[in-house]
Amino acid sequence: MNAINEHWPDASDEGVLRLITAGSVDDGKSTLIGRLLLDSKGVFADQLQAIAGSKYTRAPDQQYDLALLTDGLEAEREQGITIDVAYRYFATPARKFIVADAPGHEQYTRNMVTGASTADAAIILIDASRAADGALLPQTKRHSTLARLLGLRHIIVAVNKMDLVGWDRAVFDRIHAAYRDLAARLGIDGFHIIPLSALAGDNVVQRSEQTPWYAGPPLLTLLETLQPKPDPTDRQARFFVQWVIRHNGSGVDAFRGYAGQLQGGGWRVGDAVQVLPAGIPATITRLLRGTQDVDEALPGDSITVVLDRDVDISRGDVLTNAGTTPDLRQEFEADLCWLDQQALNPARLYWLKQGARLTQARIQMVQTRRDIHELRSIDWNGTLAMNDIGRVRLRTRDALALDDYDVERATGSFILIDAATNQTAAAGLVRLG
Amino acid sequence: MSMTIARSTRTHLDWLESEAIHILREVAAECARPVLLFSGGKDSCVLLRLAEKAFRPGRFPFPLMHIDTGHNFSEVIEFRDRRVAELGEDLIVRGVEDSIARGTVVLRHATDSRNAAQATTLLESIAEFGFDACIGGARRDEEKARAKERICSFRDEFGQWDPKAQRPELWNLYNTRVHPGENIRVFPISNWTELDVWQYIEREQLSLPSLYYAHERDVVRRQGLLVPVTPLTPPREGERPERLTVRFRTVGDVSCTCPVASDAATPADIIAETAVTTITERGATRMDDQTSEASMERRKKQGYF
């Protein structure tokens, strides 16, 4: 084996595609990632040697237990399961990939939410031998629900272990039909589906001779062609002030700039903006990327903005294009993924972090809870426990500049933090309706 | 308002840079007493450039700190002090020697690796200054336990990492809240690989200690590694020193860091070599990571970076 990264993207690359794998326990998620890394030459010789010599190997002689490439914790190796998200990196001539290998156990759903919140695409694995009759497992429903909720742009259904069902097209077609039904019920616009064997490497990097009936590309080819982010041109700029940079306040080179990461649309010097929540108008006189002056900034850029007038702006304030205001609200609805072992308690105050704004919030009411098995929301007047998803009504101490999560994530997402333990208690997705 | 900005023309380095700057600004804003760990190594040199981009023309909102094992290569210490002076920022140095003098670090042999002992000195320094966030240059591609670590990694009052009870980390909303005595370790370049780091060093024209580039050095071959011949790592019986052209992929403690054979003299040379290497950075260079399948995980559970 040689030439691990020889096809590393150059300066004209497509940026980064972030992936998450999801599925039930033993569907072969870690093995699939191991196979992707191995066949795209993303594994180093000493890493292979280390797993070959591992006392925890589950592979027969002469084979690598590829799951050990990502199951890096002692407890994971002992138990042969994935406990926490592992992040792995590889590249092809087309682009660089960041892969989050998330656990399949229901008790670790929160770790999947962690991986999915930053992912562009989800690979949902289905074990063909366990779903041969077309009945999907609860975790397939759960993970598809989460992928839809968190707004992942691409869903790839990897029908794994096709070798165990003799590469039977009828099995694949039954699973395809069942997933089409699931996707329709969840409101998933479209998905890709690939018959493969992670263990043997069929249709992972190379097209398999076992599936003459499959017309699509192998998994890696598909991943290379997915668009990572929506085209920014039709979105509106959203910018949380993270940090105010002041330098030499009374000197000739006095500087006052607002540092943060631009989301939504782009900005140019001379653009009219407004400062929220105060609603003050201003004009951009300088844009800096790092220490360099630039003419324009794109979504995702960490920049520093200088305005044409002295305005009272502090951390947490939001700059937007003039005339494109998010909603300013203290009361709103949101979907919560409850992640903490301590259940939601409506009597308590939680810290709420949205963008660079930290405030306090109370959950006034739980309205509905998502039934993962029946794929619908049901009226609910109880609490939310760990791994529950529900629609709630919140009230915050300060007015927040909000967008619907599906419109703009930066202003549509938040976390709740338990004020006593400091644990991250919930992921929140703003639903303005 | 019309906006006609075309689709993104940013490269993966731009993406990584923006993410890291965002993280640095969040931690600076939310934590009461952050500190940036600067060893003079390549990853921490990248962190300093990112901090310049995050906070200039202002000063850094945190001091720099080096936990000195006392077994560093002199070129690295000279480079460290020169770089700090150029930046005009504050550097705190705390030594494993001091912990040994206090009796809080006990080594079996005077020449043992002090790499793991750094954890004790780090925890003592965190307590001394009341730091609630320690920003470091660790990357997830370095090691399998690091691949599991969050960008903002919570440590309890004993400095311990509990991999089974990590805080969920959602979107780019980092939870930096800690109680007194606890801290978070922050890794802004978590998503970078060794190759990304070298591409960035080339793009930004960052200066590094000379050890990173090809030079001649006496080494002995031991267990597949090239062990540098130094007063701390003398040849063992039967070993014959050779004069080779080598470079260091990582510059840690003298007693446990090995160079690789290479005549790469510039970042571009190193990028070309890194692109085709078949051995990981740690696999090629570290004696102390190879003792067990979980040596890094165990050290991190005890407060190691």
Image (spheres, rainbow, N blue to C red):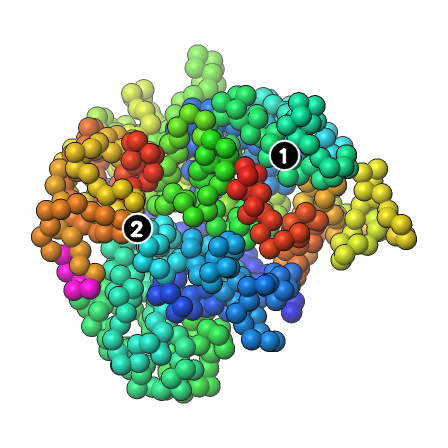
Q: Residue at x 33, y 51 (%)?
A: A110
| Residue B294 included in the magenta stretch of the image | no
Crowd class of label 1 (few under 14; some 14 to 19; many from 20; radius 10 Å): many
Instruction: Report if residue B86 is visible in the image.
Output: no
Residue at the image position 58 percent from the left and 47 percent from the top = B296
Chain holding disc 2: A
Callout 2: SS: helix
Asked if marks 2 and 1 fall on the same chain, the answer is: no
Which quadrant is the N terminus of chain A positioned in? bottom right
The chain to which mark 1 is attached is B
When the figure is inspected, residue A224 is found, relative to residue A346, above or below; the finding is below
Of discs 2 and 1, which sits in the foreground? 1
Residue at left 60%, top 49%?
B295
Per the rendering, the mark at residue A314 is none
Residue highlighted by disc 1? B118
The x, y position of residue A419, in whole percent, is 29, 31
Q: Amino acid at mark 2?
A: Thr
Q: CA distance from mark 2 to mark 1?
A: 50 Å
- Magenta span: A373-377
Where disc 1 sits, the SS reads helix
Task: Name the residue type under label 1.
Answer: Gln
In front of the other: B187 or B2: B187
Looking at the image, which is closer to me, B24 or A230? Answer: B24
Residue A278 as seen in the image, left or right of residue A7? left
Q: Main secondary structure of the magenta part?
A: loop
Determine which quarter of the picture holds residue A270. top left
Q: Which residue is mark 2?
A: A233
- List x then y, in percent, for residue A307: 34, 27
Note whether B256 is above or below A304 in the view shown: below
Q: Taking B275 as reference, is A137 left or right?
A: left
